[in-house]
Amino acid sequence: MVATRSGRKSMGGSAISMPALKSSGEKFLAFSCFVVVSTSILATANPALYLENFAGVGALMKEAGADFEVVAPLFTTFGLGWGAGKAACVASGPAAVKKFSQFNSIPMVGMIYISHVYEDLVGVATWGVFLAAYAYFGFVDKPKKK
């Protein structure tokens, strides 16, 4: 028997279920999950297109002397794990989304830094928007109590 987020008990079936997205934070994190999963898959499916859209990552890989096509499957696996964490938080509710958003602000700063160092203005702007949203949902937004 599994207790669901709504408090009802369920016999059998999948213990994993995605609730209705009620708060803005849950909606944002679900969108962010979609973004990280889709771009992570793109890294392996079409590495050249990925690097065209994430120039900072491409420049970093080039400077390191690394072949992104070789690293892409690992990159994809990490991205899928990041997405799984986001999905688990969405499924767990607004408090988990808030806590995840607080912690996830840290890698956003790292991505902004990498993009800045490698003069990827699109990356700076993209990661900056995500950082602003994570900061808002992690530190400012007060999810409504049920």
Image (cartoon, grey):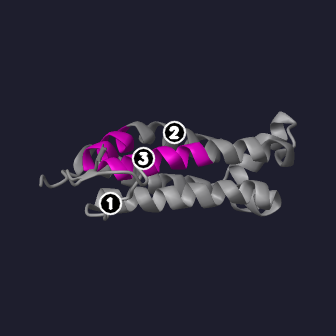
In the picture of the structure, the residue carrying the numbered disc 2 is 107
Q: Kindly report the distance in space between the C-alpha atoms of the residues bearing marks 2 and 3.
A: 18 Å
| Residue at 87 percent of width and 36 percent of height | 65
Name the secondary structure under disc 2. Answer: helix
In the picture of the structure, the residue carrying the numbered disc 3 is 88
The earlier-in-sequence mark between 2 and 3 is 3
Residue 115 screen position, x and y as percent: 63, 47
**In this image, 39 relative to 15: left or right?**
right
Q: Amino acid at mark 2?
A: Pro
Region rendered in magenta: 80-102
Q: Residues within 10 Å of mark 3 (few under 14, many from 20)?
A: some
Above or below residue 12? Residue 38 is below
* Discs 2, 3 touching: Cβ within 8 Å: no
Name the secondary structure under disc 3. Answer: helix
Q: Kindly report the distance in space between the C-alpha atoms of the residues bearing marks 2 and 1.
A: 27 Å
Identify which residue, 34 or 141, lies in the foreground. Answer: 34
Main SS of the magenta part reads helix
Residue 17 screen position, x and y as percent: 39, 56
Q: Amino acid at mark 1?
A: Pro
Above or below residue 16? Residue 105 is above
| Residue at 48 percent of width and 57 percent of height | 32
Is residue 19 at least partly visible in the picture?
A: yes
**In this image, 96 relative to 38: left or right?**
left
Examine the image and state in which quarter residue 2 appears. Answer: top left
* Image quadrant occupied by the C terminus: bottom left
In the picture of the structure, the residue carrying the numbered disc 1 is 19
Q: Residues within 10 Å of mark 1 (few under 14, many from 20)?
A: some
